[in-house]
Image: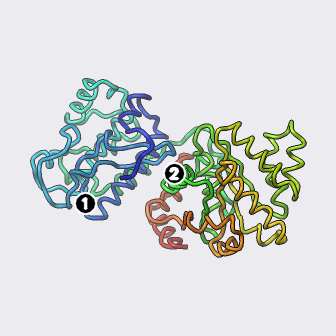
Amino acid sequence: MEYIDGVTLLEHLRAHGPIELREANEIASQLLAGLEAVHDAGLVHRDIKPENVMLTRTGRVVIMDFGLTSPSGSGSIGGTPAYMPPEQARGEATDARADVYSAGIVLAEMLSAEAGPEESSRQSFWEAIREEPPKLPETPWKPILTRAVSPGFEERYATAAELARALEEVAFRVEGVEHEHPYPGLASFQLEDAEFFFGREAEVEAVWKRLQQVNLLGLMGPSGSGKSSFINAGLLPAAPEGCFCIRMAPSTDPFAFLGRALLPELETNQEAIRFISSLGGLDPALEVLREQRAKHGELLIVVDQFEELFTQSPVDVQERFAELLGRAALEADVHVLLSMRDDYLFQCQPFEILRPLFSELTPLGPPTGSSLRRAIVQPALRCGYRFEDETVVEEMLQEVTKE
């Protein structure tokens, strides 16, 4: 089974109390996207509750425990009573609306100060939801959650996707963000754009897991698949505590650009800068990297657009820089991530020290499905805006899927 590096939603609520609407929106978006995938497969989870939702260190939301999952339309009594809809408690046939009910309670619990960490407080909260009308937190979500937890399944949202769209309709304008630009256009996302970067949570977590297992890793994808944005706004902001990250592109002088990336750390060591910026100082350069690795505990060198090494540098520079990166991974215990267009991968083959790349590749294709939708919709919601017409979003998805 997959190891999930995180905590349950229940543990998070007990540690931090009610969640602000902005964070709750992000959790809800991912939770309901996961349920949408379950329902699209013709299944009903039947046991959605905070204990079965995990929040990972990198911000991914994971639905757990599919032990009670059954095909849509089947019926039996089973689940957690506090989160079970009436029809499930009666053993009747259930469909996606049963999970909508349970998810509605979970979303309400995230926002409720009354739920509290004690079991008695949670019990009072559950009882209040089952009153008529249900007692729900006074937030902009209240009308939507009221419908989601309706005792009559005909009155609920038909699917998790419908519930997600309804939450997006809630306009929660944030003061002072009218000047923000949530979409970078044709430019790549940068580190400062991380709050507007959505839809790559699973890939970010997967790459960090691989980097804990290997020291030399290749990130491959076609041109335009978003590798630079993924690195800048996804991977680097999710770096583990204590990991020092250097990002660079080879450009016309890879040694000089690596030196510039290290400059803030080496500004009191001019000799080290001279060595790292020269073409001939491989051993001194390696020693500098080894020192930085020891200083920070972990060191990650990300070389984005690695294909520039082959397009902008002569062969002798290619050989020396490839040797430095390979030796850094092998001899100095430095993590090295090389991001490049997939059509340049074979250019690494002549360099013996880079051949481990061919067995340690992580493909990065364009986002699809609910991940692509989140990448389009969530940046606007983060600024308190929404699309006027869902049809526009669907047309955009159809046009760019697999591009």
User: Percent from the top left, x then y, of residue 172?
Assistant: 49, 42
Tell me if mark 1 has few (under 14), some (14-19) or many (20+) residues whose alpha carbon lies within 10 angstroms of its own. Answer: many
N-term-proximal mark, 1 vs 2: 1
Q: Quadrant of residue 151?
A: top left
The three-letter code of the residue at mark 1 reads Leu
User: Percent from the top left, x then y, of residue 387?
Assistant: 50, 57
- Decide which of 131, 122 is in the foreground and name it: 122
Q: How many marks?
A: 2
Q: In the structure shown, which secondary structural element does the residue marked by tag 1 occupy? A: strand
Q: Which mark is residue 332?
A: none
Q: Quadrant of the C terminus?
A: bottom right
- Decide which of 4, 401 is in the foreground and name it: 4
User: According to the image, label 1 marks what residue?
Assistant: 43
Apparent side of residue 337 relative to residue 81 in the rendered image (left or right): right
Tell me if mark 2 has few (under 14), some (14-19) or many (20+) residues whose alpha carbon lies within 10 angstroms of its own. Answer: few
Q: Which mark is residue 209?
A: 2
- Residue drawn at (60%, 44%), measured in percent from left and top? 239
